[in-house]
Amino acid sequence: FGKDTKESLETIIIPFEFEAESTALCHGIAAWFDVSFNGTKQEVVLSTSPHTSGTHWYQCRLLFKTPIAINATQKLEGTITMKANSSHSYDINLKVRLSGTSIETASNLHLQDQMYHYLSSSAAAGSTTDYTNYDYYGTSETKNTDSVNGGNWNSYHY
């Protein structure tokens, strides 16, 4: 964050593209981050990757309301748009499209409402959010249109 302004962190857009290794139903994507702290004597890297030892930060499960069937070697492309919210977190708009088709889906999620599953013995205390009546997909929608930009994405509300 040494070079980023506060304004540049209010909306973060992350484009992505993945190629499927096998034919399957894709229910969502996982997200995590790495950050480097460049000290005067050493660099310390905090990784929340599933391939590193546990911390109190975890991977996020970003689920689609409706899974997408994907074939081996087919590409899934899209964007994750993160907008800062009043809960000192981010609202996430996930847009995904199966490359070369009109199949796409979108989900609106709240980063602070993630449901974490601690799989290591060194796991930190979990979220205190009560999920008894929680609607994970609240405003998610699935659409079939001819292009990502042709859809009315601005009509989605967080």
Image (spheres, rainbow, N blue to C red):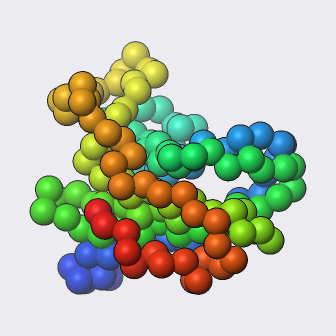
Q: Please tell me whether residue 142 is drawn above or below residue 151 in the rendered image.
A: above
Q: Which residue is nearer to you in this view: 102 or 60?
A: 102
Q: Where is residue 83 in the image (x, y as percent from the top left)?
A: 30, 69
Q: Position of residue 66 (x, y in %)?
A: 57, 46
Q: Is residue 48 visible?
A: no
Q: In this view, does 95 lie to the left or right of 17?
A: left
Residue that extends furthest to the front in the rendered view of this protein: 144
Q: In this view, does 1 lie to the left or right of 148?
A: left
Determine the residue positioned at 24% across, 68% down.
84
Q: Which residue is nearer to you in this view: 28 or 16?
A: 28
The C terminus - image quarter: bottom left
Q: Please tell me whether residue 98 is drawn above or below residue 32 in the rendered image.
A: below
Determine the residue positioned at 53% across, 65% down.
95
The N terminus - image quarter: bottom left
Q: Is residue 158 left or right of residue 86?
A: right
Q: Can residue 66 be seen in this view?
A: yes
Q: Position of residue 132 (x, y in %)?
A: 24, 25
Q: Please tell me whether residue 57 is drawn above or below residue 129 in the rendered image.
A: below
Q: Where is residue 126 in the image (x, y as percent from the top left)?
A: 26, 27
Determine the residue positioned at 59% across, 68% down.
78
Q: Which quadrant holds residue 97? A: bottom right
Q: Which quadrant holds residue 41? A: bottom left
